[in-house]
Amino acid sequence: KTVCVTGASGYIASWLVKLLLRRGYTVNASVRDTNNPKKIQHLLELDGAKERLNLIEADLLEEGSFDAVIDGCDGVFHTASPFFIATTDPQADLIDPALKGTLNVLGSCARTPSIKRVVLTSSIAAVFANGKPRTPEVVVDETWWSDPDFCKRAQQWYMLSKTLAEDAAWKFVKEKGIDMVAINPSMVIGPLLQPTLNTSSASILNLINGAETYQNAVVGWVDVRDVANAHILAFENPAANGRYCTVGRVAHYSEMVKILHELDPTLHLPEKCADDKPLVPTYQVSKERARSLGVEFTPLEESIKLTVESLKEKGFFK
Ligand code: NDP
């Protein structure tokens, strides 16, 4: 079987390509620049790449540029979307590539009759950003939707981009009769395959690279290998449908610091919280649907350990 992975050089997508090749798939992988070794070398070195990996250039904002990548495929994993926080032009930097890019990729799918299913990499950012209270008793699940107006008021542009993109995707596939499943991961950590630093791995690097304080914030964490696996299970299981929150554990940054200290007491870790307010309370995210797909969650301690080892090995800190 041949499948397409968009944005293949990214953190999650690199793992997805690796696991797909391991399972015997032929992978048509889109990258923006096939001449940049930092974006492709680690993919070319994967087991099976020589025989079954095709790298093809495509840009989210170039209408129709995914036709050639998707042509002849049985399925599409649409992961490409910018993930960063700081921007002075959210529309151009985040919202257009997320929203127009998703519709661009889905447009190519609609023109390709061999496509049986699309797996969309959405985010928990499209689920919980709605201002509803989150306390230890609250269980966030797939019925939750982020509220674009809330995201705008809070100037959470990345969250807005993911919410608008997933919402538009569901409307488009319904109209065109495309079978789609969405994966909604929280902050993804774990070993890096690519040599460059991505935003979610940077959240761990920031803690071990000399920061004096940690944020007073609670974050859902999940291992990159579990997220890649969830995508494949969602593609292969005919019964898969709708959205799947993939969140291993919700933890405050203070807990992350504690785990890091237990893993390696020589790490230079932040000792205090960035503010004097009470610690933001934790909340739960339902694992029911993810587990029904067969997703298993790596313990947070292991994911943190492998992230740190990987960041060290790649030279991001000493
Ligand atoms: P990365 O930054 O590692 O990867 C993003 C990918 O998107 C890159 O391959 C990048 O290409 C590609 N991309 C960005 N803009 C464009 C564009 N205009 N045209 C073509 N490709 C583009 O991020 P992640 O692996 O972390 O994220 C992958 C997906 O997972 C995204 O959809 C993100 O929203 C989602 N996600 C990530 C989470 C996380 O914690 N990491 C959590 C939840 C969801 P290039 O390499 O050329 O820049």
Image: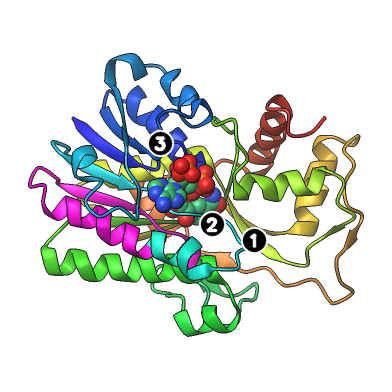
The label number, if any, that marks residue 16 in the structure image: 3
Reading the chain from its start, which is encountered first: label 1 or label 3?
3
Bounds of the magenta span? 99-127
Q: Are marks 1 and 2 in contact (CB under 8 Å)?
A: yes
Instruction: Identify the image quadrant of the N terminus.
Output: top left
Camera-side residue of 58 and 156? 58
* Quarter placement of the C terminus: top right
Classify mark 3: residues with Cα within 10 Å, few (<14), some (14-19) or many (20+). many
Distance of label 1 from label 2 (alpha carbons): 8 Å
Q: Residue at x 18, y 51 (%)?
A: 108
Task: Say which amino acid is labelled 2.
Answer: Ser
Residue that carries the numbered disc 1 in the rendered image: 219
Picture residue at 59% right of the left edge, 30% below the top? 195
Tell me where residue 104 appears, x and y as whole percent: 26, 57
Q: Quadrant of residue 317?
A: top right
Q: Residues within 10 Å of mark 2 (few under 14, many from 20)?
A: many
Please tell me whether residue 42 is drawn above or below residue 58 in the rendered image. Answer: above
Q: Is residue 57 above or below residue 173?
A: above
Tell me the element at label 3. helix
Q: Secondary structure at mark 1?
A: strand
Q: CA distance from mark 2 to mark 3?
A: 16 Å
Q: Amino acid at mark 3?
A: Leu
Residue indicated by mark 2? 186
Give the residue furthest to the left: 113
